[in-house]
Image (tube, rainbow, N blue to C red):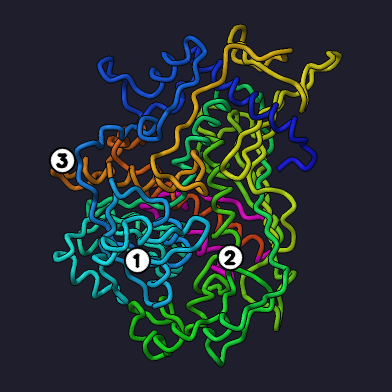
Amino acid sequence: MALDLTPEQKATGKANFEQAAGDLARAGKMNTMAVGGSPVDPQKPDRRDFIKVGLAAGAVVPVSAAVYYGYQSWKGNKAVRTALIGTGDEGGVLIGDHNPEFNEFVAVCDVRPSNLDRIFDGEPAGPRKGLNKIYGKDTAKKIERYDDVEKLLADKSKLGLEAVVIATPLNTHDVIAKKCMDAGLHVLCEKLMARTIGKCKSMTQYAKEKGLLLSVGHQRHYSTLYAQALEVINAGVLGDIKHIRAQWPRNNSFLFSATEAEKAKFAPGFDLPYYRDGWCKPILKQDADALPPEKLAQLAFGDVNQYGFKDVKELVRWRLYDKTGGGLMAELGSHQLDASSIILGHVHPLAVSGIGGKFFYGPGRNDRESDDGVWVTYEFPGPKHPKAGKGGTDESDIVIVTYSSFNTNSFEDYGECVMGSRGTMILSKEAEVYLYKEPEPGKKDSGGRDTKVTVGTGGKGPAMESTSTWGGGGGAAISKAPGASAWDSAVRGYRTEMEHFAYCLRRWQELKQPVSYEKDKDGHLKHADIIPRCHGEVAMADAILALTGNMAMDKKERIVFEENWFKTESPEVPETKHASKKA
């Protein structure tokens, strides 16, 4: 994120964060993320007590995600029998990082034969390890293949299915999720939740009516890195936060090339990519032969105009089209906006404006309908603002969140930079956190990129203090899940979101009752400890941020958010007033 941090300054920033977490834990201040919101049982100390006890002597304590998120009691449960619907890029990531002790994949489904092959074979390097490697070839042979969701659901009883993971094109999420819930299956759906806010609301209400789990794959809700960073932020050491700068730069400007062997697999009659771009892939003969337009029409769900694909090219390159995808805001920006929302306490934004367009791609050059560059500015209420829900009256207390993503330069890393009046925190690539203190006027070596800090907890509250040497050791270390891939760092949330989903499912089965999303008088879920952290209402708020940003850019106007948009029971949605070509 920061352009000019030296390796030494990065090391200082990383150590500062670990020191701050340790100092706050030893002082009993890391209490803002109680597991599930449940009271502490003296006979079963939660993650906070575990950390505090371990840190009393300055130790570095390994804390597993299961302990951190309260599902360490899994031992003895049977893995949830699960099917994957959509075996493309994101489905491959999820398979590559799932834990078979929690989710046993017994079936996979995809209309593209090349995807079905790849989900078993995996890739030589990277996150998509493949079922053969995870389960072993002999066991993987027993995993059933389907090319039609209806056929999969018809075999639900034979397979013993309990849940599905959906990783299909965005425009199909809502209809597939509902079909699976009609079959009595719990659903973990990839983000973005749905193509429109109306469909997000409908999915959420459907899960409530059916009494089933609906979880959406915004993995930062299960990142222990973000959780501990949030605890440090909530302790107040950054001071007054006024700006969060988020970004996800990429460079897809290099010319596409292929070997003769690769070209032999491409389907004739379809254009080849001009640039190397994961959203604009060559069309494989294997898929084109299996999926002529008439076959695709048969596989469409209900309204072919909403849920169908005119040809295999539109299917393979679905992220390029407005009907089927949500562009950079849905695919990348939703992650950063989700992170910013978490950091700011899930307050609803006030307004959004921005600039976006097709600045690079064009006819003959990976042409598309979606924007290839976006720069969006959100206005959020600060803690003293009336709409923050804390009794404040200062309407000028605004936090500005900027998000940018372009396709022609990857010099900076992706991540979020949180800027406060007393310090700066950088969350880089979902893997590292750097913390720096603001210099104090008139005091030499009182802050900056080279300054080591500790956190004092006396006076008016926790505050960073410059020091010539660090204090009593770092914070609680995050332990890596057994078998986790090198690509998925110890702190990313893919594995954890799936494990917790399985845990919640088993807990509701133990209770022998439908899933309840009932709330108390304060609006909090009564069963929050056994509901996925990114359930429908949370995921819908993320979709509102991303899709309304698209509308603001398309209409070139500042859009003010309305509270009823965030209420699942309200029919009001941003599309009603601000519908655009890309809605």
Q: Crowding at label 2, few (<14), some or many (≥20) Cα neighbours within 10 Å?
A: many
Q: Is residue 359 left or right of residue 382?
A: right
Residue 194 image point, x, y percent: 44, 62
Q: Which residue is mark 1?
A: 85
Distance from Cα at disc 2 to Cα at disc 1: 22 Å
Who is closer to the viewer here, 338 or 100?
100
Point out residue 202 in the picture as x, y percentages from the top left corner: 35, 60
Please state which amino acid type lies under the numbered disc 1. Answer: Ile
Q: Which picture quadrant has residue 510? A: top left
Q: Report the Cα–Cα distance between label 3 and label 2.
A: 41 Å
Q: CA distance from mark 3 to mark 1?
A: 26 Å
- Point out which mark residue 327 bears: 2
Residue span colored magenta: 554-583
Q: In the rendered image of this protein, does residue 272 appear above or below residue 423?
A: below
Report the front residue among 396 and 167: 167
* Residue appearing at x 27%, y 20% in the figure: 44
| Residue 180 in view | no
The one of 333 and 90 positioned closer to us in this rendering: 90
